[in-house]
Image (cartoon, helix red, strand yellow):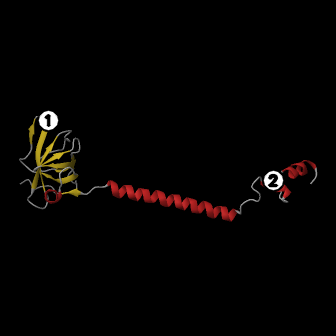
Amino acid sequence: MEGVDGARAAQTPSCRAGLSHRYGRMGLRMDPSRKRVIRLTVALTAALLLASALVYTSFSAGREELTASQLLRNARPGQSYILAGTVLKGSVRHEGTVLLFRVRDPKLHVSVPVRYTGIVPDPFAPGRGVLVTVQRQGAVFVGQQDSLTTKCPSKYQAAAASY
């Protein structure tokens, strides 16, 4: 071990073991194929964790919409539910800032009364499909403020006969 390299080599512990100083303090370099396998394993593990988190949040965030008849059967006071149905014709009225209306089950002739305060969408009208987040309070379902949305009629629906 002569010259500058020899002087440095004599000072480092790895060089005393017969290893060159150009490999650094850790000694020999890692095999490139092993390094690729480790990187692949880490990347696949991270991808799996991210995919699992996405699936979990997708399913836990979504809540089931209930119809009026399902709500009457299953609703418990204090719990929030998404009520889906059609605004019953002749049921819409205002009491100050409160909007009172009934939501009808699309398949059965059952409806529930809703008491709602908040922003009312422009397309809201009797006969229109709506979604509203409600909580049961006695016989009435109180709508969560600003949770009312209307379902737009399909542009592919057959037009009603006008004759």
How many numbered marks are there? 2
The first of marks 2 and 1 along the sequence is: 2
Kindly tell me whether residue 156 is visible in this rendering: no
Question: Whole-percent x and y of residue 7?
Answer: 90, 49
Task: Give, as a three-letter code, the residue at label 2.
Answer: Arg
Going by the image, does 95 lie left or right of 34?
Answer: left
Residue appearing at x 10%, y 54% in the figure: 111
Task: Give, as a three-letter code, the residue at label 1.
Answer: Thr
The CA distance from mark 2 to mark 1 is 80 Å
Q: Residue 23 occupies which quadrant of the picture?
A: bottom right
Residue 122: mark in rendering? none
Going by the image, does 30 lie left or right of 56?
Answer: right
Kindly tell me whether residue 48 is visible in this rendering: yes
Number of other residues with Cα within 10 Å of mark 2, as a class: few under 14, some 14 to 19, many 20 or more: few
Going by the image, does 5 lie left or right of 57?
Answer: right
Residue at the right extreme of this rendering = 2
Please identify the quadrant where the N terminus is shown: bottom right
Residue 125, placed above or below residue 36: above
Residue appearing at x 71%, y 61% in the figure: 30
Q: Regarding mark 2 in the picture, which secondary structure is present there?
A: helix
Q: Regarding mark 1 in the picture, which secondary structure is present there?
A: loop
Q: Nearer the viewer, residue 138 or 38?
A: 138
Residue 22: mark in rendering? 2
Look at discs 2 and 1 and give the one toward the viewer.
2
Residue at the top extreme of this rendering = 96
Residue appearing at x 50%, y 59% in the figure: 47
Question: Whole-percent x and y of residue 33?
Answer: 68, 65
Please identify the quadrant where the C terminus is shown: bottom left
Residue 96, placed above or below residue 150: above
Question: Whole-percent x and y of residue 82?
Answer: 22, 52
Mark 1 sits on what residue?
Answer: 97
